């Protein structure tokens, strides 16, 4: 029987508290290869000009919660076997990955390709997109993890592509983060070792997918969901990233270093090693397109 | 009576001998503000994988000629009062500007906002997009200028934004150009002074539009067409330009230096000084979108 694949357009921006994530999702959908996969749009409250409320340590908590439950309902309505998620901030992954874990009897494997581990809350940077993997593991935010009926098994999680900042970069980030009063509620490394999560840093991932394939085999991962945060890419070769804003200096974050061709190769190799039933593409921030759109909106002849 | 404005989607790539100009045009159309202006697509032969033939010193001459006459026919069919051109390489401007000059009794003013003057042929770089302004003035390429029934009056032309390379940049470009055996058939400066064309370099344009407004007044420009080559922008603040390919070094060209806000301001000021009846936006080369599209086309789950 043919598997049913749907595309979920998820223009969620509240998880990163940046309206442009919505536009990034729409452009991602426009760029995706045309085929018969239905495109299902999740209703997302547009940015209306007023700042998000910080509710119990999360900006836009109520909107995010509503959008997450809406995603669950849409997936239950369509009952796909496979889901492509076009985001949006990283938190868009939670509902579809949780749905897929139910579909595959709690045995879903999750490959989290990201410069950051997305496991814990950052006090002082109260944005939900630091938490999706934590929530999926039954940790993270209490209210949000309560939506995950069956948490992903820790041994079924592999985090790959973690940024390895240079010493200089590290100290710059630490300074900026301290100045802003941002700190993780629990050290990410502690969570990783407490749960025994597999990881590869960006350099290791660039070299080989051997350990990912080994993990797939040893843990008998038959169905895999891949999270792709585009921030894993080298921002000099792919510039449509939050931290590659041409009008601002980098801050708060270490840059990714994976090359585009290598990323494609990784996804292909993993897709050959097991059945990929989910792929989420997130944090697309197309600065040039955003800026060009603004210019076009300001040219009188295009608006008469 | 309300003026009729149409948008001409002109995914022409042959004039720059680079297939990606087509995609740049399509993305430009997608980014344009939605309103009632009809979008008319000019039929353009897609890149089929084989290199363009160099015909009498121009790559893809026959295709370009055919597309130019097709544009003329479409304009004659729709008879708009105003035209927005969404390019495509710079040569897309010729047919609509020539049409507009007929509409306005040979008195059309042309503001050519570009890092390059687009006046002459470059031997060794046989691409038609170095020639549109030359052709419109009844100079340039014989076959192409023959399509311009009434040449634009030289006193009605203003070139603004010419790149002013640093000495270091200048010598690098000269070296590269000499190594490649590229040379202009006639010095651009000579053409400018022979025809008495007004010019502003990028620094002057960044400072004031005073001399443009003066020119509009003195020459009684009642109807103005604006050509905008996006290469006039500072490539560190807008990176969707031919010469800002993340995978290649800059070459053969001086970088633009105008900031985005300033460009918008310039177009607005000019639009207040006279009636803008044409605006062409050209040479959009959205590297990130091109590269992301390629990645999405390679991810197995999006293509099953």
Image (cartoon, coloured by chain):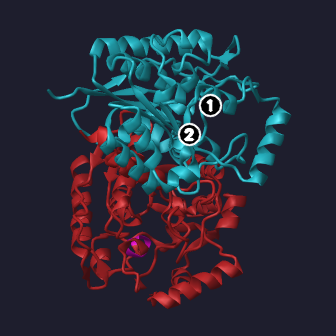
Chain colours: A red, B cyan
The chain under label 1 reads B
Horizontally, residue B63 falls left or right of residue A22, namely right
Circle 1 residue: B192
Instruction: Pick whichever, B196 or B157, lies toward us.
Output: B196
Quadrant of res A96: bottom left
Residue located at (72% from left, 24% from top): B186
Quadrant housing the N terminus of chain B: top left
Horizontally, residue A70 falls left or right of residue B256, namely left
Q: Which residues are magenta?
A: A132-136
Find residue B226 and report its horizontal and vertical position in percent.
Answer: 42, 35
Circle 2 residue: B199
Find residue B264 and report its horizontal and vertical position in percent.
Answer: 40, 50
Contact between labelled residues 2 and 1, with CB atoms less than 8 Å apart: yes
**How would you classify the magenta stretch by its main secondary structure?**
helix
Give whichever of discs 1 and 2 has the lower sequence position: 1
Question: Relative to A72, does residue B53 appear above or below in the rendering?
Answer: above
- Kindly state the secondary structure of the residue where label 2 is placed: strand
Q: Using a 10 Å C-alpha cutoff, classify the residue at mark 1 as few (fewer than 14 neighbours), some (14 to 19) or many (20 or more).
A: some
The chain under label 2 reads B
Instruction: Pick whichever, A267 or A55, lies toward us.
Output: A55
Let me know if residue A128 is in the magenta part. no
């Amino acid at each position: 029987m043919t598997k049913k694949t749907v595309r979920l357009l998820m223009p969620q921006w509240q998880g990163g508290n940046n309206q442009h994530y919505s536009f990034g999702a729409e452009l991602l959908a426009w760029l995706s290869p045309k085929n018969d996969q239905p495109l299902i749009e999740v209703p997302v409250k547009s940015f209306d000009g007023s700042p998000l409320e910080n509710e119990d340590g999360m900006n836009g908590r109520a909107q995010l919660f509503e959008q997450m439950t809406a995603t669950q309902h849409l997936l239950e309505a369509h009952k796909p076997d496979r889901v492509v998620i076009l985001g949006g901030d990283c938190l868009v992954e939670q509902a579809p990955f949780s749905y897929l874990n139910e579909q595959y009897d709690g045995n879903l494997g999750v490959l989290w390709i990201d410069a950051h581990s997305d496991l814990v809350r950052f006090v002082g940077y109260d944005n939900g997109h630091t938490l999706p993997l934590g929530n999926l593991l039954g940790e993270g935010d209490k209210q949000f993890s309560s939506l995950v009926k069956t948490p992903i098994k820790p041994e079924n999680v592999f985090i790959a592509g973690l940024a390895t900042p240079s010493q200089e970069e590290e100290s710059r980030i630490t300074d900026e983060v301290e100045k802003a009063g941002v700190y993780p509620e629990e050290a990410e490394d502690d969570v990783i070792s407490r749960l025994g999560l597999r990881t590869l840093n960006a350099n290791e991932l660039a070299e080989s997918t051997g350990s990912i394939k080994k993990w797939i085999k040893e843990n008998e991962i038959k169905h895999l969901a891949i999270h792709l945060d585009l921030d894993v890419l080298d921002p000099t070769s792919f510039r449509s990233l939050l931290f590659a804003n041409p009008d601002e200096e980098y801050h708060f974050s270490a840059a990714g270093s994976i090359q585009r061709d290598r990323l494609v190769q990784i996804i292909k190799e993993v897709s050959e090693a097991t059945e990929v039933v989910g792929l989420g593409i997130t944090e697309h921030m197309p600065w040039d397109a955003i800026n060009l759109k603004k210019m076009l909106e300001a040219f009188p002849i295009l608006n008469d």
